[in-house]
Amino acid sequence: MSFELQVQLHLNGKRGVDILHDPILNKGTAFTESERDALGLRGLLPARVGTQERQVMRVMENLHRKATDIEKYIFLVALQDRQENLFYRVVMDHLDEMMPIIYTPTVGQGCIEFGHIFRRPRGLYISFKDRGRVREILKNWPYHDVRIVVVTDGERILGLGDLGANGMGIPVGKLSLYTACAGIHPAQCLPVTLDCGTNNEALLSDPLYIGIPEKRLRGEAYDDLVEEFVTGVQEVFPRACIQLEDFGNANAFRLLHKYRNRSCTFDDDIQGTAGVTLAGLYSALAITGNRLSDHRFLFLGAGEAGIGIGDLIVTGLMAEGVKEADARRKCWFVDSKGLVVKSRTDLVHHKLPYAHDHAFIGDFLQAVETVKPTALIGVSGMPRTFTKPVVEAMARMNQRPVIFSLSNPTSKSECTAEEAYAWTDGRAIFASGSPFPPVAYKGKTFVPGQGNNAYIFPGVGLGVIASEATRVTDEMFFVAAKTLARMVTAEDYAKGRIYPGLDRIREVSSAIAIAVAEVAFQGGLTAMKRPDDLPAYIKSQMYDPTHVKYVPGP
Ligand code: NAD
């Protein structure tokens, strides 16, 4: 269904204030004279017809009056609830400034304070008390052509842990990025929180907590709720892709494996993170001048992010002709107990492929000295664990040490950008999960790369929905990583940056979408016929908030 038709159906019967109160239809003062006449808006707006440019000026002026990032977040959420096209125009035109507010790190603070800053609900809240009526709830959603669902149960929000129903800030934020970065129409995006309770004592005793103040649902009852949700989505929104988001790691791997071959589902924390990190590593190869198979990777953290990245690195190594067993031996993990090795009896299933035949080492620095990695990847959620001796050891062993400190938000980062550059005498190839400002060191300015999943998942999602793919495969994340790495320019490298600038994100997303759609067409993952001009087709699917088509109903 075209967006025009969708707006028309949505508009059908709506007039006057009902339009102004609908964030997708509302254009505020920018309604034209003829729209005002046709839609019963005359007199409900100031007489001077505004433009989107002037509306953006007004928003920016007000935004810059806010003293703190959390106030800016509240202001932007309110704008999104009032007038989405303007919200997206603002976000897209100032992505560098807006990304850290609508996404990590500020969204983390937004989730912590969610019950206290709550104004209007957005998305669907499905609680464990709703068992047996999940389909009915899905049918309450006012838009009928949902194509991307981002769902969380709030158990592992960023690196902040269990935030229960407050986690809704994450699906909302991620879907904003789908629209801003890849042009997926806001009416095609559905944020969902499965409110399964929380084990966070502070929230349980907070009178303003918005979720059900009970301990987390576990076991069969939990699985039944998720099952009812996934099958409900398949029935009510049959063309939707489900993105699993910020589930605790005991559930994340299980749910991904359970649903990835039964539905159009992926887990961004596992697969999206892997895509953006592998892209960073491919970019790093342009600096180190060698191949992936010349590297040895040591991870701090063996959870969703770490194992997901490890698995995609293995795919990359195998593409270079390395045998799977040898590829796994190039990836080493340290978890909260120490080096992941065969002799350990406490390893959960997802760590086993990386449990090597080696003596156990409890201390991280000693693990670094022993494994002698060329690349260190921090995904532990444990701040300041890449200590000076650890980073100095990397600098001693490698001409260009790769140091990715990916834990979010900024307060959880394994080391800062400044530390990585200073402790390696400016030789580190550095990337972080949350943004760090440029670092001046010995007369040179380094621009740290942000391994932001927003480089990957919006493009993958766009490729999947544009090709009507019925499954999301690892190969899609692999081609996404390769495509992203190819888009880094000589100018980026000169600044020490291993990802393209965010100002090119729509170009990046559409290139990734084309590559992903090709995988779907070539792999028989869709019943759709490949359009002759795939790039033009993908482009035609991308929403542009400046040109919101306004078609009055009959
Ligand atoms: P997770 O809970 O699944 O895994 C965390 C892992 O860290 C576990 O294996 C745990 O054993 C290990 N760990 C905990 N304490 C440790 C310690 N002291 N030393 C070593 N290991 C320790 O979480 P996750 O989804 O893998 O996310 C981990 C971190 O990565 C989070 O901070 C998250 O924000 C970040 N992350 C970043 C990106 C990105 O930059 N693009 C994407 C996803 C996740």
Image (spheres, grey):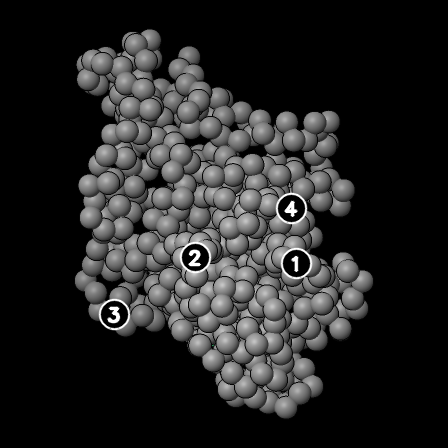
> What's under tag 4, amino acid-wise?
Arg
**Residue at image mark 1:** 285
Which of the 4 quarters of the picture holds residue 387? bottom left
Q: Position of residue 204 (x, y in %)?
A: 26, 68
Instruction: Indicate which disc residue 202 carries.
Output: 3
Compute the Cα span from label 1 to label 2. Answer: 25 Å
Question: Which quadrant does the N terminus fall into?
Answer: top right
Other residues around mark 4 within 10 Å, as few (<14) / some (14–19) / many (≥20): some
Q: Secondary structure at mark 1?
A: helix
Q: Amino acid at mark 2?
A: Gly
The answer to whether mark 4 is within 8 Å of ligand 1 is no
Disc 3 residue crowd, few under 14, some 14–19, many 20+, Cα 10 Å: few
Residue at 29% x, 41% y: name it.
76
Which of discs 3 and 2 lies nearer the camera? The answer is 2
Task: Check disc 3 and report its element: helix, strand or loop.
Answer: helix
**Residue 421 place in picture, x, y as percent:** 47, 65
Q: Secondary structure at mark 2?
A: loop
Image quarter of residue 21: top left
Secondary structure state at the residue bearing disc 4: helix
Disc 2 versus disc 4: nearer the observer: 2
Q: Identify residue for label 2.
A: 443
Q: Tell me: residue 455, above or below residue 42.
A: below
Give the labeled residue for mark 4: 486
Identify the mark nearer the N-term, 3 or 1. Answer: 3
Q: Percent x, y for residue 358? A: 66, 87
